[in-house]
Image (spheres, rainbow, N blue to C red):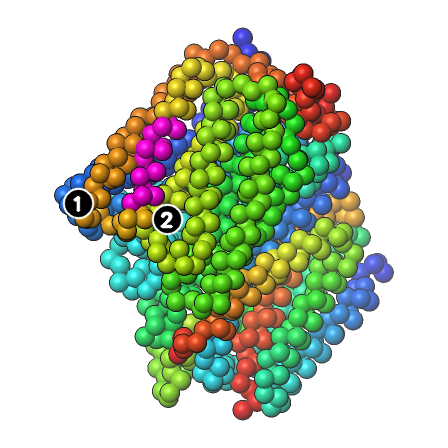
Amino acid sequence: MPEAQPAFQFVDLRQQQQTAQLGMWTFIATEVLFFGGLILAYCVYRTGNPDGFAEAARHTKIVIGAINTGVLLTSSFLVAWAVTVARLRQSGIASVLLWLAALLGLGFLALKGIEYAIEYHEHLVPALNFAYGGPNAASVYLFFCFYFIATGLHALHVAIGIVVLAVIGRQARRGLYSDRYHAPATVAALYWHFVDVVWVFLFALIYLPGRAS
Amino acid sequence: MTARNYLTEDNSLSSWFFTTDHKRVAVLYAAGITLFFFIGGAAATIIRLELATPQGDLVTSDVYNRLFTIHGVVMVWFFLIPSIPSTLGNFVVPLMIGARDLAFPRLNLTSWYLFMLGGFVTLYAVFVGGIDTGWTFYTPFSTMYSNGHVVLAVTGVFIAGFSSILTGLNFIVTIHCLRAPGLTWYRLPLFLWSLYATSVILALATPVLAMTLLLVALDRLFGIGIFDPARGGDPLLFQHLFWFYSHPAVYIMILPGMGVVSELVSVYSRKTVFGYKFVAWSAIAIAGVGFFVWGHHMFVSGQSPFAGLVFSFMSFIVAVPSAIKVFNWTATMHKGFIRFDAPMLYALAFIGLFTIGGLTGLFLACLAYDVYVTDTYFVVAHFHYIMVGGMVTAYFGGLHYWWPKITGRMYPEYWARAAAILIFFGFNMTFFPQFILGILGMPRRYHIYPPEFQVWHVMSSVGASILAVAYLLPLFYLGWSMFFGKRAPSNPWQATGLEWQTPSPPPSHNFAATPVVKRNPYDYSLKGEARPQNA
Amino acid sequence: MKNWQPPRELLVSWLALLALLGLTVLCAYQPLGAVNTGLALAIATGKSLIVAAVFMELRRSSALMIAFAAAGLFWLGIMFWLALSDYLTRTSPYAS
């Protein structure tokens, strides 16, 4: 395998690595603000309708949600593991781990799909078939607007991440990574971990409220 | 016979449309924003023609609403925001730091494609009927009642927003990681400090706009009612989210202009910038504090008086770093060897006009006074003094200053000075009467008004026609200079920056050898002799 | 071949994350009133810190990298603080 060369604008591989990492963290910061805007809207409405939101949250599928959280956390573990062994030139193991993580990502999406189907069945989908009675119907409706927008956007990010992991996995299989050159793998891993962190917060905000009553 | 440079390297269409050379991307952007400037300007022309008479006789109210909306949308997102960063910034940043390109050249080209795509989607929205919501897309009108093409328009802006985010990301990382040896932060030219501050805002504020526009589009497409009071939504939430971006956005628009002025004032006074560190950190301060003031757009909207208080106070604070810059530029010029070349005329105009615009901003920051003049022409005049008198002026100044570097040609100096003076005159005649109109009570976004306001509107419209001619002049003489202008040397202004230590136009990879920086920027001797940064 | 095993920190972090997940679900069912929300968010923050510090390698990164990582959160904080300062001081009802 020939030695990796830095791109023409970089002096050496180390500068390229640092630049790529800084670039990904900057991108992550932009995503924090992107999801953050939505979460602010959620928080504003939840502060105004605490009971309605609590009632709505009880209708989310906490079992699926919790399993999905575990799935993503595990996939993050696998990705972090993969990057470590990729740097040690264990290309076969790295690629298997990355593809397993991607598979878990697909599992996440599958479970999400099942969840959406159940919610459709229960008439909880705004703009499609939302039907809910009781005094808090308006807040429940708002809650589910946020639920679908937030988890939908998150799922989109997961889908992109799955493709990225698959590509990185393939590059790892071809022995591209070493302790000198591993920028794409590190940077892709950062993205995947970030998607995981977003889900951790969405889980806390969506599935957990109102369970104690 | 000129040496091989980035322009002559390869002239096929594909070499331009698949370029990753930051200099070519800058030229592509320049073409794009020029197109959008004239489209936005055309809307303004019709607006000013309509406003010359008190009756609504040129266009219907509905068409008028679409005109001022498209003027705002195109000018803000497709001209002002990309203007200096994506044209001058893209061209100059790697040169100024002694690098061969930006950190992510392919991302840079992607930014341009996203920008043009967003622009064409928005123009398509205009073409099929336009939007009448104002550039601010306030809900619930935009989400529930408007009969314009809101989803199409916000989609165009959404796409262009990603262009901004990626440009900001690119600049931040480039300035952190690709500086030449010896180029410490305090040796960076002030243009880069300003662009860095701008880039932080681009990266962190724009995503919130993206989310806001997404919610508007979803609300409109699926009727979900997130901002509908009847269903528990709060229209003010839209305003909070929108202005969280749009106020820092105005700093995106002005900070690069301030950076350009710092460069110009130094070169054309043959002196180092007074209080370099203060000017540098004031850019960061403007970017930072600028995130704390957005509620001053919402004083009369129904937000709590306590919030109004906080936002008003912070709006006063944010004026301080701007004032520091104005004082320091003035001190820079004191006892300098001043040359009144066209770029300097633009810089001087900027200082005066920005000061007026900025001071009137303080009027607006006062809660009680704002109640009186909000949504009147006072506000319109205020932001045009900053955006046009400030930013557009600075853009022209920078364009002329770096023109020899970009094109390898000198522009015709006397035409340029004449245009600059005509712009200054036309601009003031257009917008100063608008302050008076505002105080007299003329509301913004109205095209039918009481006859007693007409004299001021006529003055403004006459000024606008002069301004229109004045803005067309550079199109002609700069265009002429591209083919017939005198060939430019590497350093026609005898300036100190690294961008002047390479040929005009530069070769594709910018420098034959990576420069090593040994000096502060703006190192001029007491006699005004330049000592280049790498000498 | 012995290089294939996951470093101990990664394994321990993963188990800790799963434990925190179990904890947060358990706590959600305890009637703690207003504390429930704060606790859920605190545990979420804890999980995120583990992911950020260990998986995203921030504990071994430069101060610059950590500053960049924190920047998004800091600016988000500004947005939350000032927007909520409006909503929490309103005297008339909103969004009801």
Q: Quadrant of residue B451?
A: top left
Q: Quadrant of the C terminus of chain A?
A: bottom right
Place of residue A196 in the rendered image (x, y in percent of width and height, measured from the top left):
62, 65
Q: Name the one closer to the observer, A73 or B225.
A: B225
Q: Nearer the viewer, mark 2 or mark 1?
A: 1
Three-letter code, disc 2: Val
Residue A74 badge: none
Please indicate, yes or no, whether residue B287 appears anywhere in the rendered image: yes
Distance (Cα) linking label 2 and label 1 = 21 Å
Number of other residues with Cα within 10 Å of mark 2, as a class: few under 14, some 14 to 19, many 20 or more: many
Q: Name the one closer to the observer, B17 or A178.
A: B17
Which residue in the structure is indicated by mark 2? B379
Number of other residues with Cα within 10 Å of mark 1, as a class: few under 14, some 14 to 19, many 20 or more: few
Q: Residue at x 64, y 73 (%)?
A: C44
Q: Earlier in the sequence, mark 2 or mark 1?
A: 2
With A141 as the anchor, is A110 left or right in this view? right
Q: Residue at x 70, y 66 (%)?
A: C49
Q: Is residue B430 magenta?
A: yes
| Highlighted range, magenta | B423-437
Q: Are marks 2 and 1 on the same chain?
A: yes
User: Considering only vertical position in the picture, is B126 above or below C45?
Assistant: above
